Image (cartoon, helix red, strand yellow):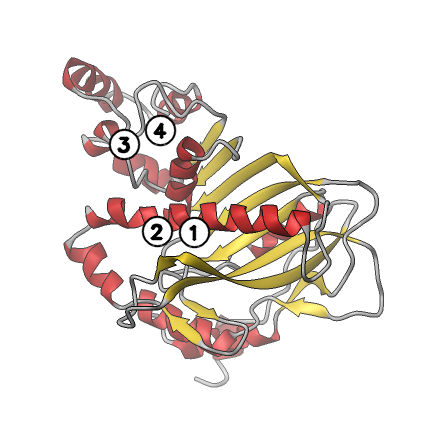
Amino acid sequence: MAAAFPVLFPVFSLEKPTGPYQVGTVTYDWTDENRLEEATKEPNDKRELMVQVWYPSEKTDNLKKAPYIKNVPEVTKGLEESDGIPSVLFSHLKYVKSNSWLNTKISAKQQKYPLLIFSHGFGNFRNINTFEVEELASQGYIVVGIDHTYDAAATVFSDGRVALYNSDNKKMISEDFEKMDSHNKIWVEDVQFVLDKIEEINKKDPLNYFTGRIDLDKIGIFGHSYGGATAGQIIMQDSRIKAGINMDGAFMGAPIPQKGLGKPFLVMDSEDTLNSYKGKDDIFIKNGISGDLLKKYKDFFAKCTLKEIMLFQTEGILF
């Protein structure tokens, strides 16, 4: 078995970003004093988030590269809890380096850079799409990834405290899936709080990275799975965000109005997800379609090929 592990789970390298900028990264530990933490038994616990920022940086040859995952034992333990995959199978991740550099200054090529928020999937973590956020940062975006505490595999705070994936989530997913709608409010409020903090560090960053360097008029959001659902919700609720992407995520949270989201929004789905839409009413009802219109859409959808379903979404008939 020891000999087989390196073959089955090799130490991989992330693709190098293709943009003109080197990528820097830094983390923040932020506490929302206006929200209680619902996942703990302590009545006075406040909602605390670890946030990682990737950004276009000045080039340097003397500083250290950031690891792909800083706290591998904690994160893999959380993945074992959320997905049931033995943590030992992920132990090799501690050897994987990212393409981001620590303690680098933001690039002086532009005065301000547009901002993107990334929201991970349920039971995942902020680094899960490192390949994507590094590419975006290399192309001139500041990208902020959020660990949604207790819904992420693991969140390790700046003082070493660990918040593992909440095991109660398994019951919610398997027995009370409709609760996922109301639960998404926590994630939406996480994003709104992070936006508030970003506005603060744009005025005066205590770490002296981003003061005056973030273009708050150009903010987008993208997320995977439950994070994609969060992107759909926040784009309806917060005027600061101008566009979004849902990557293979159902639409959790409040129903989408029949008139649509009112902002540019891309829906990306795998073939399995597209197939799952067929024969189900909830995908329509959640998007504000009911009555005679529901029957019309169901009849139309039942005859569609996967290619036609993709066109159906792209043209914005549903979303």
Q: Quadrant of the C terminus?
A: top left
Residue type, mark 2 in image: Ile
Q: CA distance from mark 2 to mark 3?
A: 16 Å
Tell me the residue that label 1 is attached to.
190
Q: Which mark is residue 255?
A: 3
Q: Nearer the viewer, mark 4 or mark 1?
A: 1
Give the SS element for disc 2.
Answer: helix
Any part of residue 289 in sight: yes
4 vs 3, front mark: 3
Measuring from the top left, give residue 91's x and y in whole percent. 49, 78
Q: Which residue is mark 2?
A: 186
Kindly report the distance in space between the C-alpha atoms of the residues bearing marks 4 and 2: 33 Å
CB under 8 Å between discs 4 and 2: no
For label 2, count other residues whose C-alpha is less than 10 Å away and answer few (under 14), some (14-19) or many (20+).
Answer: some
**How many C-alpha atoms fall within 10 Å of the one at disc 3: few (<14), some, or many (≥20)?**
some
Query: Reading the chain from its start, which is encountered first: label 1 or label 3?
Result: 1
**Which of the two discs, 4 and 3, labels the residue nearer the N terminus?**
3
Q: Are marks 2 and 1 in contact (CB under 8 Å)?
A: yes
- Residue 54 left/right relative to 314: right
Mark carried by residue 306:
4
The kind of residue on which mark 4 rests is Leu
